[in-house]
Amino acid sequence: MLSQAHELHQALQRKPQAERTAAAYQRILQLLPPLWHDPKAASADDARFAYASLEVAMARDLGDEKAYAGAADTLRDLLHDSPYSAYRRNAEFALSQIEIFHLHQAGRARPNLKSFVHDYPADPRVAVAQLELRGQKVSEPAYLLAPEPAATVPGAARAPAEPSPTPPAVATLKPAPNDAAPDGPASQSWTVNIGNISQVQVYTTSGSSSVVIGLRQPVSFQRGELPKRHLVYFDISSRAGADPGGSKTLRVRDGRVVQIRVADNRPGFTRVVIQTTAGANADRGGLFPNPERLIVGVRGGAAAAALQLPAAPARPAAPLSDGGDSLTRALGLKIHRIVLDAGHGGHDTGTIGDGNLLEKDVVLDVALRLGKLLQERMGIAVTYTRNDDTFIPLQERTAIANRVHADLFVSIHANSSPASVARGVETYYLNLTRDPQALAVAARENADGDKGIHDLPKLVRTIALNDKLAESRELAEDVQHSLAAATGEADRGVKTAPFVVLIGAEMPSVLAEISFLSNRTDDQKLRQSAYRQRLAEGLYQGLRSYILSLSGERSAELR
């Protein structure tokens, strides 16, 4: 069905634009959903990305802005259902551009832009994403093209035991002539001189590894993989009549890439085999000119501490979502420790759901899952206000955070409503200022010069309070967006309220309401381990997005 959809679209593209109709596009689109609705289908991600590409093509051909919204929904589903998809790189970038230029939701695009910049530093589109994160206006990039054949070598061999799937209709950005290799020196580099391959370099950062295969001339390639053996391979065209160049094995061992083997596969082709660790995933690779090279991104796994990698270059913090700045960002502050607060505990059961499911038990389980993700993937120090069924007074919870010098405080709760139909997720932050302009007015008044040096401590506290509120709002927005995306539940938005548990915190703090225990459907979901893990993943992605918006990196992301 995938190839049929591609052939029909190619035929449609050969017609004059005036003859391309919505009905013709719909006939092609209807071929693809069965591929991702079938749990046994191996091409679900291929079909979803092709579907989004077709929706973009339809939007451009027919001037149909609603098709852009459909493409955005398709890409969100792909990222939600297949978080380690080989299409993640293109899907994150494409979705962010659609949200910016066609849905006018620049704030919603920020988490994917941050993730894209962090995970794929070698991608030439990073420069555009960085400008967009800074709030600068750019021309709409060619972010997602209509489906076209993947870069393939006719007749390239495949492993008989575990054949790779048919190459998908990949939509990629065509690089500009000045696209460069990853910045800075390579972590490891080898001269190869086999076939068209001159060298291999590996750039390892805390968040990803980039394998850069230097080429003597433009080539075509085909990708295959042996998932059970954690192998991905690329058959690269060679010069006609070239002498066999032997083979070479390159030991990498950076926590994601175990080794790389380069060898003549058959006349006219050189095979590059990348062996990854069990937790790592290689993307589909992309060709870039001037100089010619094939770049393969690898994410997941853990950057090897023993490698003694050069320090990542410092980078400024992204602006706040409203385009403003904060003292936290101006001073380059980072996240060392997060306090996770599981609501209620002990005699305080919290909300009791249908069938006597207790809020205190649900949120403790989610908090412990979240803490494990933060520690294992980012190396963040985590303190729990409680890690068992213990009652902790509200004021003591933030006091714990203050005592351990936490950088963030996150309180996790399950919601309740008299209306049993109420569902969804929402995130709160504390705003003690009734007038949002009050601090700005105070700053202007202070400029009159009637304050003395003895007023400095008070002024500093005022500035710090304003800064904490701005960062709490930013944190709440990132958590809310990711939580809603991870669960697929109704997005009830970011709100402010005077929660006592947040009042004493000296650091940015939020309270997440992860579901409604008063709703029978939510109650049933919250009983499932898989759903609680999804909630933890959503909270983790929100915290990760916020952490990556700050300058530099305090902790290496380990997965």
Image (tube, rainbow, N blue to C red):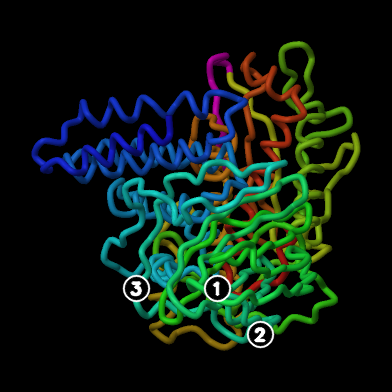
Residue drawn at (51%, 66%) of the image: 237
- Asked if marks 3 and 2 touch (Cβ < 8 Å), the reply is no
Between the C-alphas of marks 1 and 3, the distance is 32 Å
Dot 1: within a 10 Å radius of its alpha carbon, few (fewer than 14), some, or many (20 or more) residues?
Answer: some
Q: Looking at the image, which is closer to me, 499 or 249?
A: 249
**What is the quadrant of residue 402 in the picture?**
bottom right
Identify residue type, mark 3.
Ala
Between the C-alphas of marks 1 and 2, the distance is 42 Å
Identify residue type, mark 1.
Arg
| Part of the protein shown in magenta | 418-427
Dot 2: within a 10 Å radius of its alpha carbon, few (fewer than 14), some, or many (20 or more) residues?
Answer: few
* Residue labelled with disc 1: 329
Residue 44 position (above or below residue 452): above
Residue drawn at (67%, 36%) of the image: 534
Q: For the residue labelled by badge 2, is the local secondary structure a helix, a strand or a loop?
A: strand
The main secondary structure of the magenta stretch is: loop
Residue closest to the far left: 18
| Label disc, if present, on residue 176 of the rendered structure | 3
Q: Position of residue 314 (x, y in %)?
A: 59, 81
* Residue labelled with disc 2: 191
